[in-house]
Structure formats: C-alpha cells, structure tokens
Image (spheres, rainbow, N blue to C red):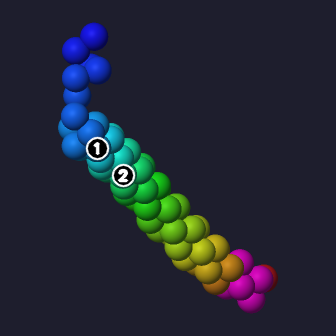
Amino acid sequence: MAKNNISPSQKNRHKNLKIIHKIIEINNNLNVLNAKVRRLENRVSQLENEEKHLSQKIMQLTNYW
C-alpha cells in the first residue's frame, strides 16, 4: 500500500533505473556476441591459412609425381 505514496519523480527515477539496467544488459549481450564473432573470424582465418597450406602441399605432391 505504501507504493501509492510514491511521488511521480520517484516513479520516473525507478523507471529510468529499469531502462538503464536493460541498456546495460543489452550492452553486455552485445559484448558477448562481438567476442564470439571475433573468435569465429579468427577461426575462419585459421582455416583459410590451412587451406592454402594444404593446396601448396597438394601442388608439391602433384609436381613430385
């Protein structure tokens, strides 16, 4: 029942704090996703390098035979 005595400015403050909390949560989620994207980009780069290396090996073996 005490909630009925909350002033409009207190309600706004509470609402603003909830919004700020949600923004922080979204930002944290974006940071996690960005880290995952960076790891995937690194993995793709690594696989591309391995592919080049294997292609060179195949060429060497093809020329050898």
Q: Position of residue 15 (x, y in %)?
A: 32, 41
Looking at the image, can residue 12 be seen? yes
Instruction: Specify whether 57 is left or right of 3.
Output: right
- In the image, what residue type sits under mark 1? Asn
Residue under pointer 2: 23
Label 2 to label 1, Cα distance in Å? 16 Å
Q: Residues within 10 Å of mark 2 (few under 14, many from 20)?
A: few
Q: Is residue 9 magenta?
A: no
Q: Where's residue 50, x and y in %?
A: 57, 71
Q: Marks 2 and 1: which is nearer the front?
A: 1
Residue drawn at 22 percent across, 23 percent down? 5
Determine which residue is flagged by label 1: 12
* Residue 61 in view, yes or no: no
Residue at image position (60%, 74%) is 48
Q: In the rendered structure, which segment of residues is drawn in magenta?
A: 57-64
Work out which quarter of the rendered image holds the C terminus and state it.
Answer: bottom right
Look at 28% across and 10% down and name the residue there.
Answer: 1
Question: Considering only vertical position in the picture, is 31 above or below 57?
Answer: above
Identify the residue at image location x=49%, y=62%.
37
